[in-house]
Image (cartoon, rainbow, N blue to C red):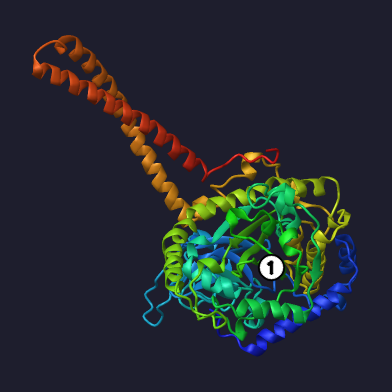
């Protein structure tokens, strides 16, 4: 496994400079439709790459495949990236990634098993195909063919393609191109200084969801700040906060300053080797963020109050990362960090974190501030916030809130893909007259160049790779037309897209289901006891009401028993209703933009 922290400073700088060069070349390139570059590639796939020479082919990148905590360490895990079927498995020490296809008859290795072999010289586990029992080691080499005369002497050709893997921010990253795997170590992961520390404190806050539409639509959506007041009305912002966004594209020097600000925070331990600059980055012009940024303008729960010194930045880190970096009036910055992975045309996965400095442990003393006598109490308050409130909220409650956010987009984006396909349109037909669409337009141009670079590699799977990322086949057809139109309930499904694979939510759901079972058992008991006590109360009053003192006590006790049983029945019905509503949130919640 490649180490994240072991990268040299010179490599990070070289990559940053390459990204800048790509940015400059890209800005000078005229928008080119998918059909145009497809025609160029048909003419000559061996021609010089020209303007795309500094844009990496899609398969020659680190892709955020899955959160580690959603994977099974004891069994192989089937995954898909760029239309390529992969299998992730844990060899006892490291995560491994290989083609999900046995070298024998191409059966899926994800249906196999992971086990410890009897080789005393190797402590790592093997992956075995369940079709004929062929065994493969961590590098994809076949170590045993049971049907061979000498089972342990497998031919050199009997291997499965293996791909580099890194673990960063609790995510399994895969470089899905074996031919360029030697280059993978020189490309750093786009993990912010804030996220590096946040993930250590709040690993449970990481959220992953399968999306019923393509990478290209999700990426251009999350990179678009202007949709927040409308798609996420009363969730993240308000329709009243939809105003002009005065974006400014940042130069290399300006991007360096943003990095210096992020890395110099007292909540960060970042070094120069951790530096990754965005491919493209914009900021809302100084003095206007408090009015223009819809998150600042809405100021949810009073945590984002802004003034003329507040800053708002939005960056795209090719190919998979979008980062919002905001600093409100308090000076405590917050990020929204999204990682997007294309699975196939019309299908992608998103991973999101929302780190903020106010909920993190200080890693060093702020030399710019003088000590005051209330600092001790402030430190106690922050400790309680981190250890009690946020530890609880950053799990299930945070995941359910994030569902509410994505539910606001899912219907739009899925239907958008269908309409683009049905009407023979692509992104070049968009009406994009305002600066709010700056990064979305640039992302689409970058994606065209990356697709072009992919085709020029001569990779056999290039067509499938491009189709997964662009949502358009090379013959001009759209895979979206072949996808069945999904119902609203399917588009807003939470269980299959998240809950069943999330250890945080599946555990919470299991607890709720057990509570419901207990209440289902208790309710008939309470109702029966209520009825019996009511009858006993009526009989005791009529029979013993005017009798001696012991008889009166019996009548009084029967009446009180009835009252207690009735109260328990009412509370049980109420609690069951609450539990059922809580359970429903893990499956599906109705969402309407007309409200």
Does residue 159 appear anywhere in the picture?
no
Marks counted in the figure total 1
Query: Quick one: quadrant of the C terminus?
Result: top right
Residue 355 horizontal/vertical position (percent): 57, 66
Pick the residue in front: 396 or 346: 396
Q: Is residue 60 left or right of residue 551?
A: right
Location of residue 5 by image quarter = bottom right
Residue at point 86%, 54% (across, down): 430
* 365 to 148, vertically: above or below: below
* 544 to 361, vertically: above or below: above
Q: Is residue 362 left or right of residue 537?
A: right
Residue at point 51%, 76% (across, down): 154
Residue at point 65%, 78% (across, down): 261
Q: Secondary structure at mark 1?
A: loop
* 464 to 532, vertically: above or below: below
Label 1 crowd bin: few (<14), some (14–19), many (20+), radius 10 Å:
many
Does residue 184 appear anywhere in the picture?
yes
Pick the residue in front: 284 or 50: 284
Residue 12 horizontal/vertical position (percent): 66, 84
Q: Which residue is mark 1?
A: 310
Residue 418 horizontal/vertical position (percent): 77, 46
Location of residue 290 by image quarter = bottom right
Pick the residue in front: 181 or 144: 181
Residue 81 horizontal/vertical position (percent): 64, 63
């Amino acid at each position: 496994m490649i180490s994240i922290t072991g990268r040299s400073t010179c490599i990070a700088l070289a990559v940053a400079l390459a990204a800048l060069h790509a940015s400059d070349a890209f800005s000078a390139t005229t928008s080119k439709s998918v059909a145009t570059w497809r025609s160029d590639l048909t003419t000559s796939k061996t021609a010089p790459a020209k303007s795309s020479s500094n844009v990496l082919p899609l398969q020659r990148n680190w892709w955020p495949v899955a959160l580690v905590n959603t994977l099974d360490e004891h069994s192989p895990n089937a995954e898909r990236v760029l239309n390529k079927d992969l299998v992730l498995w844990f060899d006892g020490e490291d995560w491994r990634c290989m083609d999900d296809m046995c070298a024998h008859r191409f059966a899926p290795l994800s249906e196999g098993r992971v086990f410890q072999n009897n080789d005393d010289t190797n402590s790592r586990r093997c992956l075995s195909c369940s079709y004929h029992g062929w065994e493969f080691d961590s590098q994809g080499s076949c170590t045993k063919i049971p049907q061979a005369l000498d089972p342990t002497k497998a031919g050199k050709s009997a291997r499965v393609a293996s791909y580099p893997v890194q673990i960063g921010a609790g995510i399994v990253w895969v470089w899905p191109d074996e031919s360029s795997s030697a280059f993978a170590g020189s490309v750093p992961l786009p993990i912010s200084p804030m996220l590096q520390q946040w993930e250590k404190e709040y690993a449970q806050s990481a959220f992953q969801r399968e999306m019923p539409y393509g990478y290209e639509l999700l990426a251009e959506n999350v990179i678009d700040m202007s949709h927040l007041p409308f798609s996420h009305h009363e969730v993240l912002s308000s329709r009243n906060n939809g105003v002009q966004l005065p974006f400014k594209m940042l130069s290399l020097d300006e991007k360096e300053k943003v990095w210096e600000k992020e890395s110099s925070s007292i909540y960060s331990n970042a070094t120069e080797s951790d530096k990754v600059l965005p491919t493209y980055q914009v900021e809302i012009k100084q003095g206007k963020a408090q009015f223009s940024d819809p998150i600042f303008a809405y100021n949810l729960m009073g945590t984002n109050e802004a003034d003329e010194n507040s800053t708002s930045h939005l960056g795209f880190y090719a190919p998979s990362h979008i980062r919002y970096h905001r600093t409100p009036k308090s000076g405590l910055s917050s990020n929204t960090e999204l990682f997007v992975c294309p699975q196939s045309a019309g299908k992608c996965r998103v991973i999101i974190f929302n780190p903020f400095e106010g909920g993190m442990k200080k890693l060093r003393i702020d030399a710019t501030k003088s000590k005051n006598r209330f600092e001790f109490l402030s430190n106690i308050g922050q400790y309680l916030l981190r250890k009690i409130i946020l530890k609880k909220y950053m799990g299930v409650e945070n995941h359910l809130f994030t569902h509410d956010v994505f539910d606001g987009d899912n219907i739009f984006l899925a239907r958008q893909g269908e309409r683009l396909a049905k009407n023979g349109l692509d992104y070049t037909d968009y009406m994009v007259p305002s600066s709010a669409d700056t990064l979305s337009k640039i992302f689409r141009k970058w994606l065209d160049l990356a697709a072009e670079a992919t085709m020029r590699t001569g990779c056999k799977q290039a067509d499938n790779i491009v189709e997964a990322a662009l949502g358009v086949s090379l013959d001009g057809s759209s895979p979206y037309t072949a996808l069945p139109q999904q119902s609203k309930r399917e588009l807003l499904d939470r269980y299959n897209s998240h809950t069943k694979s999330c250890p945080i939510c599946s555990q919470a759901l299991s607890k709720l289901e057990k509570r419901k079972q207990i209440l289902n058992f208790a309710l008939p008991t309470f109702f029966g006891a209520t009825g019996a006590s009511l009858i006993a109360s009526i009989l005791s009053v009529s029979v013993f009401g005017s009798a001696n003192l012991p008889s009166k006590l019996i009548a009084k006790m029967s009446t009180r028993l009835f009252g207690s049983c009735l109260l328990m029945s009412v509370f049980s019905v109420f609690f069951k209703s609450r539990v059922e509503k809580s359970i429903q949130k893990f499956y599906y919640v109705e969402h309407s933009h007309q409200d």
